[in-house]
């Protein structure tokens, strides 16, 4: 704020001559109206209208000194009392609601000797956002008409207005709500000049970490949870020639984390927002589920981004949520654009045509909805998920060689209980989940995300050891000095042999340069692909551990017996120095 400039008019008579003024120099020099429509959100128009009355009442109470103003006549003071009174404000009709902000700006203008008014409106789109997705046609029309009246009266042709500022999640184009407003400028996080004002950068957060004495290792983990929103760097007058990106923290999340004071405990602060609760229904659509699984797996996706949402876009989103028709490519772009605008995606790269999940917090939110979908559709027991999580927590916390084999047998048993409740099929059109690595990957991601004090990486690209080839590690988990790389396979029954487990383990070990820990585990997991029943489906584990007391290989075959699949220490010798 201290570095911000505001363009102001030189004089009342010369509307075209303006100059820049430091923002802080204007503080306290203009009358200001502030109103927030967030708490007006509801499921029907009648309760929205009552909410708007309450918000107006609260707004007028901030200026009840006007009831005694020497610059207002008695009729104007009585009218103010109508808005200020708790009971009288409940009787406001729609015309009085629509003209409320405009009337208040006029009274402030008169009280402050014709000093023009700033009107600040927060969450201007909160009600419309819900109304477009959930209201019936009649309630939607009434809602849009009400807010159109409020905004037009206050912001269009109002001689008492100096400047109006509206903040919200989406710019709803062609909705009628903002139609006809003069000189309306729109700025969001994709505009390089204004992106610097969104979120907090690392330098700013480091000051908070220092003030609250957050230990560096926990600060680094907080970064993986709450940082990651990419915006273009602004260099004075233009975007830098390299289009450099700056990573930003979600303000709400990092402030909530610091406010809690439990610096070793990381959680999602999006849980109660409910902005994407509808995603659970859409996961029944294969195109949507495929994209969500790709994102959770750490992949980048591309789509034709919509920066402005129209009423038709919201209608299309609503029809997708409530319908059972196959989603079109345009519909998928609408959904993904909605997720981007809502903060669930971020750009990846300066070209701004690739997108990914920004951090662990959003990965957790997406993963939770995906697993909830699988639990609901395919009856996965949440207790079994938690049981597998608890065992993985033990493995990461106490990686002792003498108990490692026991821990992994336990994890094998718990994970098999999870995966065998899902109907996996070979035919994409058959009832069930198509048996590939995505579903297994998603389940393991979700289990790993729930473990405490660990850092998760997914689909990490790197150069393989002993090779210049690029590869992608399926899952990386670290905790203190313990590191884990997992390689996931779904090998058909007919192709299964010991060689596939050896190859999978070697592939996991080839990503050893991703780990800078002292105790490392490389794990190959195969979930048998085939049309067997749940009881007959097999799972295979193979692990190579590198600890201070040496290297060890152990595994569990499809029968649940210990088996190294023909892998021994001599086979691993070429990798030893790189993964210790």
Image (cartoon, rainbow, N blue to C red):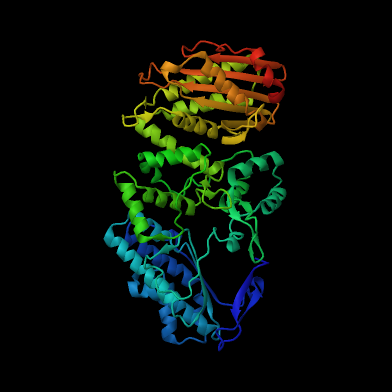
Q: Quadrant of residue 461?
A: top right
Residue at x-position 30% and y-position 47%: 322
**Furthest residue in direction bottom, as rendered:** 13
Say if 233 sits above or below 491 in the image. below
Q: Is residue 9 above or below residue 192?
A: below
Q: Position of residue 284 (x, y in %)?
A: 35, 39
Query: 161 or 50: nearer the eye?
Result: 161
**In the picture shown, does residue 364 fall above or below 117?**
above
In the picture, measured across the screen, residue 134 lies left or right of residue 547, that is left
Quadrant of residue 77 within the rendered picture: bottom left
- Where residue 274 sits in the image (x, y, percent)? 43, 48
Residue 552 left/right relative to 143 = right
Q: Nearer the viewer, residue 323 or 273?
A: 323
From the viewer's perspective, is 475 left or right of 310? right
Query: What is the residue that sits farthest to the left in this orientation?
Result: 138
Viewer-nearest residue: 479 or 431: 431
């Amino acid at each position: 704020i201290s570095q911000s400039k505001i363009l102001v008019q030189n004089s009342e008579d010369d509307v075209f001559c303006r100059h820049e003024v430091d923002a802080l120099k204007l503080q306290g020099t203009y009358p200001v109206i502030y109103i927030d429509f967030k708490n007006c959100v509801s499921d029907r128009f009648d309760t929205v209208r009552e909410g708007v009355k309450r918000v107006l009442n609260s707004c007028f109470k901030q200026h009840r000194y006007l009831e005694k103003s020497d610059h207002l006549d008695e009729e104007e003071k009585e009218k103010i009392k109508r808005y200020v009174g708790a009971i009288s404000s409940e009787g406001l009709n729609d015309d009085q609601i629509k003209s409320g902000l405009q009337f208040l700006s006029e009274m402030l203008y008169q009280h402050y000797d014709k000093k023009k008014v700033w009107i600040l409106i927060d969450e201007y789109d909160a009600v419309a956002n819900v109304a477009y997705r959930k209201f019936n046609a009649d309630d939607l029309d009434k809602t849009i008409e009400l807010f159109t009246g409020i905004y037009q009266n206050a912001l269009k042709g109002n001689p008492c207005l100096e400047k109006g500022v509206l903040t919200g999640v989406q710019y709803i184009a062609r909705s009628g709500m903002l139609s006809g407003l003069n000189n309306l400028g729109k700025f969001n996080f994709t505009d390089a000049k204004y992106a610097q004002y969104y979120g907090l950068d690392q330098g700013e957060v480091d000051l908070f970490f220092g003030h609250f004495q957050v230990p560096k290792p926990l600060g680094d983990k907080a970064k993986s949870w709450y940082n990651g929103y990419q915006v273009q760097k602004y260099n004075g007058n233009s975007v830098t020639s390299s289009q450099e990106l700056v990573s930003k923290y979600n303000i709400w999340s990092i402030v909530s984390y610091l406010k809690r004071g439990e610096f070793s405990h990381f959680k999602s602060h999006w849980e109660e927002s409910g902005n994407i609760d509808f995603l659970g229904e859409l996961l029944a659509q294969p195109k949507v589920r495929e994209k969500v699984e790709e994102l959770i797996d750490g992949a980048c996706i591309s789509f034709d981004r919509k920066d402005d949402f129209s009423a038709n876009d919201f209608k299309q989103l609503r029809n997708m949520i409530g319908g059972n028709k196959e989603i079109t490519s345009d519909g998928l772009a609408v959904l993904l654009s909605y997720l981007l605008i809502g903060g669930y995606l971020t750009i990846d790269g300066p070209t701004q045509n690739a997108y990914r999940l920004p951090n662990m917090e959003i990965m957790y939110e997406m993963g939770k909805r995906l697993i909830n979908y699988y639990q609901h559709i395919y009856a996965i027991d949440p207790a079994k998920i938690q049981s597998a999580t608890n065992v993985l927590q033990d493995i990461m916390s106490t990686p002792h060689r003498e108990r490692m084999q026991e821990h992994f047998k336990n994890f094998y048993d718990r994970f098999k209980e999870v995966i065998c409740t899902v109907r996996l099929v070979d035919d994409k059109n058959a009832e069930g989940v198509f048996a590939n690595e995505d579903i297994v990957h998603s389940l393991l991601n979700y289990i790993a995300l729930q473990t405490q004090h660990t850092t998760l990486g997914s689909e990490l690209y790197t150069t393989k050891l002993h090779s210049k080839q690029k590869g992608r590690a399926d899952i990386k988990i670290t905790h203190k000095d313990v590191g884990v790389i997992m390689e996931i396979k779904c090998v058909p029954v007919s192709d299964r042999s010991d060689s596939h487990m050896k190859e999978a383990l070697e592939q996991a070990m080839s990503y050893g340069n991703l780990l800078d820990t002292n105790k490392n585990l490389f794990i190959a997991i195969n979930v048998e692909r085939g049309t067997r029943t749940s009881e007959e489906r097999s799972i295979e584990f193979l692990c190579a551990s590198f600890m201070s007391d040496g290297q060890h290989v152990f595994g569990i075959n499809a029968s649940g017996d210990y088996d190294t699949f023909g892998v021994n220490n001599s086979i691993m010798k070429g990798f030893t120095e790189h993964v210790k």
